[in-house]
Image (cartoon, helix red, strand yellow):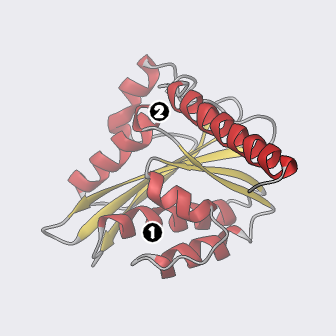
Amino acid sequence: MRSGSQVADFVLNYLKELDGLNRSVLEKKLHTIRWAAPIGPIVKINFDAAFNSQKRESCSGLVVRNEKGEVICSGTILNVNIPLTFATEVTMCFQALDLGIQLGLSEVEVEGDSWTVIRKLQEEKKDRSEIAALIKDSKHQSLSIRYCVFHFIYRDSNKVTHFIVTEGLKKGETIYLMNRVPPGLRPWWMRSGGGRST
């Protein structure tokens, strides 16, 4: 038999749980298909990866943008001997963080469209998956940046980076471009507003 206070605690906890589920459903419904610029001095680094399982290679793509949506840097990195698709995404995140450090960025939001990888990077508990070492390395790398957070972004909101990585895998090249996007993306980039809404 439960006391009145135990029943009251149970009901309050149950209501809090239902409220949390309700918020979760609302958040999923409210996602946008447009990229949003960061606020203030924060810089966004969007990353994506494409994986060729036959060649066991991948291409990492990234775009670094400021609060005006202006490109600070974009690039592709060809990676070889990558065993897993998830390893590709975490490797790209590590490379994005490394670039942020090289650029001297101090406040960064890192966005990727791999929910599993972003969730693992956000968690404080020790990861025990096949990509645990890569997750640990990325978390350690993020400590070199004064303010660094990881956010999931829907693929529809990560179109620019997806286009860059797809082209990079086709061309099989590693490139870094300052203040611009790759040449094949420029006509589309300008038609779409130059990054403010993609």
**Residue under label 1:** 91
Residue at image position (58%, 27%) is 26
| Helix, strand or loop under label 2 | helix
Residue 136's place in the image compared with 189, above or below, is below
Residue 175's place in the image compared with 12, above or below, is below
What type is the residue that disc 1 sits on? Thr
Report the front residue among 118 and 168.
118
Task: Give the crowd class for mark 1: few <14, some 14-19, many >=20 residues within 10 Å.
Answer: many
Indicate the quadrant containing the N terminus: top left, top right, bottom left or bottom right. Answer: bottom right
Task: Give the crowd class for mark 2: few <14, some 14-19, many >=20 residues within 10 Å.
Answer: many
Q: What mark, if any, has residue 157 been given in the picture?
A: 2
What type is the residue that disc 2 sits on? Ser
Residue at image position (26%, 60%) is 51
User: Is residue 42 shown to the viewer in this render?
Assistant: no
Report x, y in % for residue 181: 46, 40
Report the front residue among 135 and 185.
135
Residue at image position (68%, 59%) is 103
Residue at image position (47%, 25%) is 33
